[in-house]
């Protein structure tokens, strides 16, 4: 039904859902505009992330993120990885906006986590150490979380309050 459709999901009132395909379909149905110069150019040029991935665009910086939208995907996260290359990460998508907490059990790479609200604005960024089983709670409710290599956000000048645009890949492309 939505095979081959991709949408730039913006923070301007997009209706985020439990999984990337639902979020993309709802944003398209709501008639939300596309935004973000880089993302708009990429979409117009026919470039999209593969199914199961999303581009998280913050100004001139883009992370190609695996999307974790099911309970099992979120539970495994980036466990057992030996590296998380620059410009890559994982985007966790939840059904609701509430305080979140992550831990680093079985995660071998130092990560930063950015918690994002339903409008894709960063509400907290925390540095997380490998193999720590204590939780890293968000300072504010979040509907999304983006994990990247530790230090990446600071190196890019991305902080709390930064607005992201997200382009989700849709199944069937």
Image: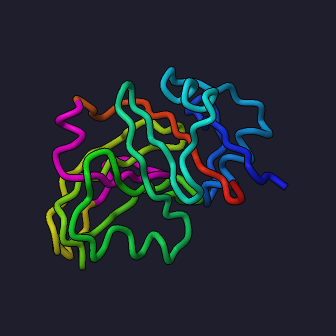
Q: Is residue 169 left or right of residue 142?
A: right
Image x and y of residue 61, in percent: 35, 32
Rendered residue at 38%/43% (across/down): 63
Q: Is residue 25 left or right of residue 41?
A: right
Rendered residue at 30%/35% (across/down): 160
Asked if the stretch drawn in magenta spans residue 148, the answer is yes
Asked if 166 appears above or below 39 in the picture, the reply is: below
Q: Magenta residues? A: 137-156
Q: Is residue 96 left or right of residue 29?
A: left
Image x and y of residue 85, in percent: 26, 53
Report the colour scheme. rainbow
Asked if the stretch drawn in magenta spans residue 85, the answer is no
- Quarter of the picture holding the C terminus: bottom right
Asked if 147 appears above or below 59 in the picture, the reply is: below
Q: How many marks?
A: 0
- Quarter of the picture holding the N terminus: bottom right
Q: Nearer the viewer, residue 143 or 30?
A: 30
Asked if 33 appears above or below 112 in the picture, the reply is: above
Image x and y of residue 19, in percent: 61, 59
Image x and y of residue 18, in percent: 61, 60
Rendered residue at 57%/56% (across/down): 96
Residue lying farthest to the right in this orientation: 1
To which quarter of the image does residue 82 belong?
bottom left
């Amino acid at each position: 039904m939505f095979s081959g459709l991709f949408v730039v999901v913006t923070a301007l009132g997009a209706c985020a859902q439990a999984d990337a395909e639902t979020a993309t379909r709802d944003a398209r149905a709501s008639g939300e505009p596309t935004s973000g110069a880089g993302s708009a150019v990429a979409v117009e040029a026919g470039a999209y992330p593969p199914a199961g991935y999303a581009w998280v665009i913050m100004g001139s910086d883009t992370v190609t993120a695996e999307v974790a939208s099911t309970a099992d995907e979120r539970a495994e996260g980036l466990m057992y990885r030996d590296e998380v290359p620059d410009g890559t990460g994982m985007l966790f998508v939840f059904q609701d906006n509430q305080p979140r907490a992550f831990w680093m059990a079985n995660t071998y790479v130092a990560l930063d986590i950015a918690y994002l609200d339903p409008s894709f604005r960063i509400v907290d960024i925390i540095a997380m150490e490998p193999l720590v089983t204590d939780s890293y709670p968000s300072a504010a409710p979040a509907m999304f979380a983006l994990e990247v290599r530790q230090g990446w956000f600071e190196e890019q000048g991305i902080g709390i309050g930064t607005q992201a645009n997200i382009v989700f890949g849709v199944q069937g492309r």
